[in-house]
């Protein structure tokens, strides 16, 4: 059952944008839970230039079944043109938590 779930990593601007993404994913039943880590500094190359930005990191828990809709929703709602969106398969987890995830994502 654990392999049916993903932990999704996504950066976003700090503040209202990140909160709106987290709230929206949960309210649309696309994620059971979204944690916001309020302060990360991202270093990356974009369109040939080096960038350093203060962002936050969202950690979302979703299911394989919800993943296509999750991606579509992020594409339409995220303020970035190319948002970071990495889905990591859950290998193991506590039965109670995984049962809760399954219930929230029905």
Image: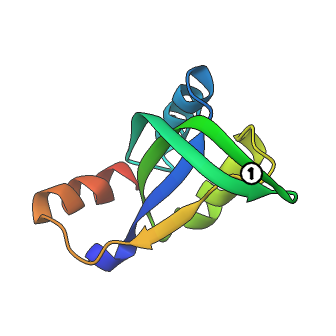
- In the displayed structure, 2 sits above or below 69; it is below
Check the picture and name the quadrant holding the N terminus.
bottom left
- In the foreground, 56 or 41: 41
Residue labelled with disc 1: 75
Sort mark 1 into few (<14), some (14-19) or many (20+) by Cα contacts within 10 Å.
some
- The mark tally for this picture is 1
Q: Is residue 95 left or right of residue 21?
A: left
Q: x and y percent of residue 97 in the render?
A: 18, 56
Dot 1: what SS?
A: helix
* Residue that protrudes farthest toward the top in the picture: 16
Q: x and y percent of residue 29 in the render?
A: 48, 46
Check the picture and name the quadrant holding the C terminus.
bottom left
In which image quadrant can residue 15 be found? top right
- In the foreground, 50 or 68: 50
Q: x and y percent of residue 70 in the render?
A: 59, 56
Instruction: Report the colour scheme.
Output: rainbow
* Residue that protrudes farthest toward the front in the picture: 50
- In the foreground, 94 or 80: 80
Q: x and y percent of residue 91 in the render?
A: 27, 78
Q: Is residue 79 left or right of residue 52?
A: right
* Residue that protrudes farthest toward the right in the picture: 47
Residue located 48% across and 43% down the image? 57
Residue located 54% across and 64% down the image? 86
- In the foreground, 21 or 100: 21
Residue located 52% across and 62% down the image? 66
Q: Is residue 17 left or right of residue 37?
A: right
């Amino acid at each position: 059952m654990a392999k049916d779930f993903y932990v999704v990593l996504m950066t976003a601007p700090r503040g209202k944008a990140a909160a709106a993404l987290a709230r929206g994913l949960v309210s649309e039943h696309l994620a059971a839970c979204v944690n916001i880590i309020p302060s990360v500094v991202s270093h990356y190359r974009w369109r040939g230039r080096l960038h350093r930005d203060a962002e936050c990191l969202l950690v979302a828990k979703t299911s394989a079944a919800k993943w296509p809709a999750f991606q579509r929703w992020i594409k339409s709602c995220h303020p970035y043109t190319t948002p970071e969106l990495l889905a990591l398969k859950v290998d193991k987890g506590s039965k109670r938590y995984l049962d809760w995830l399954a219930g929230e994502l029905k």
